[in-house]
Every structure is written in structure tokens, then in C-alpha cells.
Amino acid sequence: MSTSRKVGTVSRGIRCPIIRMGDDLAAIVTESVLEAAREEGFSLRDRDVISVTESVVARSQGNYATVDDIAKDVRAKLGGGTIGVIFPILSRNRFAICLRGIARGASKVVLMLSYPSDEVGNELVSLDSLDEAGVNPYSDVLSLERYRELFGVNPHPFTGVDYVDYYGSIIRENGAEVEIIFANNPRTILKYTDAVLTCDIHTRKRTKRILKEAGARVVCGLDDILSAPVDGSGCNEKYGLLGSNKATEETVKLFPRNCQPLVEDIQNRILEATGKHVEVMVYGDGAFKDPQGKIWELADPVVSPAFTDGLIGVPNELKLKYLADNDFKHLSGEELREAISQSIRAKQGNLKGQMASEGTTPRQLTDLIGSLCDLTSGSGDKGTPVVLIQGYFDNYTND
């Protein structure tokens, strides 16, 4: 009878103390994982993955900035006059706080919203409503008045917020005039102003290129705002305001910076304590989409801003059901198990293009593991900012 292990991948949320600015996060993470192992009766193994949420990394770094810091940088980089603010996501936590600073750094904001939804799937109007109204979102530009005439008020189904009204109010409350339009072609904004702040996340490079080629005088992305400190503020050299979250009514917590030393420090501490070589990563939003709400989770610029070398690459896996239904369809029981095990042991270093790997997930390991971590830790009150994953790199042959 087979004595092989009966459990594959296990994901555990690890409870930690509340992290504050200046805390020795590497020490806290290491001790929290080791203490959990002692109390729960499990052991660390080589190639386990320890993942730390970006939120506590940024907090320990003290990587914060104020709304006025944002305003000062916006004013310096975009001139302080009429600014086109295009393609923001609809989020109280992610963008509304940034919009306060943007408005304070401008005399007028022309807010151009993509429709029928924002980049991550928050809907302003349904596709069915567009069809009924005969509106082509690829070519038609709608004024606020025309949008209201056609579609009325459309509160977000989860938050109940009418983001069109909400964002307009934020801009006015922070001292700028506002005009709101709805369009999906970046060039449209140049009819209103030649100073543009593009707020999309994953399409930002293309948007910047299109605007520059179309003759915009100044083009910045959110990644260009707070890419350096303003009056001693926090910053993120690579991502600027991208990945930031509301901390208070007047401050944002930025995406963590320079995380590579942290993940390597944790890796070394675990090796010294246990003799096991684990992998370590910092993770933010997972990369998955909610089919019911149609919202794509990934509002961070990347799933993982830092990770150890063993997490570079993509999975290299055979599809067991393909082998069972095709190559070994004539076998069953122990013969089938052994035949599949032999195939796994003999698999090539790169299975790309082979039918036996068809249907496996060709995504970066950090995106897959980060998504698992995000689902494990949640974003509420679980109190598990560290996730330990065991057995992720195992296969059917590992005992």
C-alpha cells in the first residue's frame, strides 16, 4: 500500500503583533512564523514560502505622505492650472484621497472617466444600458449632462457610492473648478487641456505614449507623483502614488519601497534558525477577477514588489487529467499511479507547447502565490499579515 503524503499545498495565515513604524519587521515575521510552528505542531521545510503583506512593510518603513505633499508635487509637475485627470479607478480607499491632493494642486480639473467601467471593473453604466441608448464607448464622448440624461444616477452596487458625484464634490471641496466627461480615447482630453495626469495602472505606459505623440505639453502618471520625497515625505521611486491606500483623511500610505533586503533578511533568519531554505515575498493585491461583481482585484501596480530568487519564473507542470485520459487511459490503480509518477519524474525543464501541459496556468509564480496569499489573509480583521505556504512546489511524486 502507498505511504505517500496525503496533503498537498497548505496555506496558513500567521498572526502577528500590530506593526508600527520603525519596528524590526524581519525579526517579527521570523519569530511569528517560528512561534506558529511550535504552537501548531508543524515544521518548516525547504521551499516553503513566507509572504508578507505590503501594508505592514510600508507601515514599518513609515512610507506615508500627506494630501498637501501630493498637491505640491502635482503643482510643480503639471503647472497648477487646468489639469486633465484621466482614467482613475473608482475607489474611496485607493483614489479619492489622491484626488484631494490633485485638486489642491490645480485651478481646474477636467475629470475624464472611462466607461462603461473603470480599469479594474467598477461599473458606471451597464453594457446593456449602452446598447439600449445606442452609445458607442469606443468613439462617443459624453458630457456629465448627457451621461445623466441617458443613464441617471448609478450608485456602485457594493458601496452605494455615486462616484461621479463623489469625485466632483471632492474636487470642488479642495478648491478647484471641475468639469466631468466620459471617454475612452486618451486624445480626447487634449481638447480641454494639454497638461494631463493619467491615473490608469496597468495601461499607463501606452496612455502616456499616445498623449505624448498627440502633442500633450505635460504628461504625468500617478507613478510620477511622489516618486521622490516632498518636504521629507515618503515616496516610491518606481511607482509613485500607484499602490497607495488611504491612511487618514489627510494622509496616504504609499506602496513599500526597497523591499528586497527585507525578504532576503527573513530568508537568512529562517535558515539560521531552522536550517531550511525558504522563499520569501512581499505581496499586495492578488491578480484575480470576481465574476459576480466583475471587479478585477489588482489595483496595485504589481502583485509582488520583492521576492527571493526561487520565486522567479512560471510553473512547469504536467496536467494529470490529460495523462489519465490520454497517454494512460488503459491503466488504473497502482499501474496508473506509477505511470503518471514516472512521467512527472521524467518531465523536461520547459514544457511550453506540449499537450501534456495544456490547461496549466502560465502565470508568474509570484502572481499565483500572491493571489493565494491575498485570499488567505483577506483585507479586513483577520490579523494575519503573514502567510505561510507549504507544499506549493510539491507534485504527485513527493512523499
Image (spheres, grey):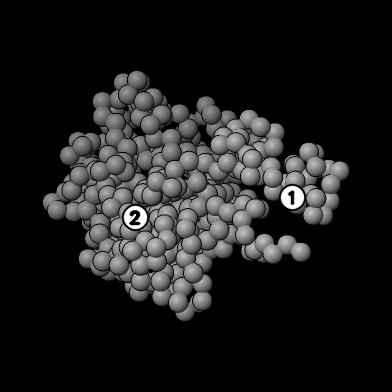
Q: Is residue 143 above or below residue 267?
A: above
Q: Is residue 89 left or right of residue 350?
A: left
Q: Nearer the viewer, residue 141 or 297?
A: 297
Q: Which residue is mark 1?
A: 338
Say if residue 173 shows up in the picture: no
Q: Quadrant of residue 274?
A: bottom left
- Residue 290 on image: x %, y %: 59, 52
- Residue 319 on image: x %, y %: 69, 43
Q: CA distance from mark 2 to mark 1?
A: 38 Å
Q: Quadrant of residue 25?
A: bottom left
Q: Which label number is shown at residue 157?
A: none
Three-letter amino acid code of the residue under disc 2:
Val
Q: Nearer the viewer, residue 269 or 131?
A: 269
Q: Residue placed at 35% from the left, 20% from the top?
A: 213
Badge 2 vs badge 1, beta-carbon distance below 8 Å: no
Q: Is residue 271 above or below residue 353?
A: below
Q: Earlier in the sequence, mark 2 or mark 1?
A: 2
Say if residue 262 shows up in the picture: yes
Q: Which residue is mark 2?
A: 263
Taking the view exactly as shown, the residue that stands out farthest to the left is 231
- Residue 364 on image: x %, y %: 50, 42
Q: Residue placed at 53% from the left, 29% from the top?
A: 138
Q: Nearer the viewer, residue 315 or 171?
A: 315
State the quadrant of the N terminus: bottom right
Q: Residue placed at 16% from the left, 48% from the top?
A: 230
- Residue 272 on image: x %, y %: 33, 64
State the SS at label 1. helix
Q: Is residue 26 left or right of residue 120?
A: left
Three-letter amino acid code of the residue under disc 1:
Glu
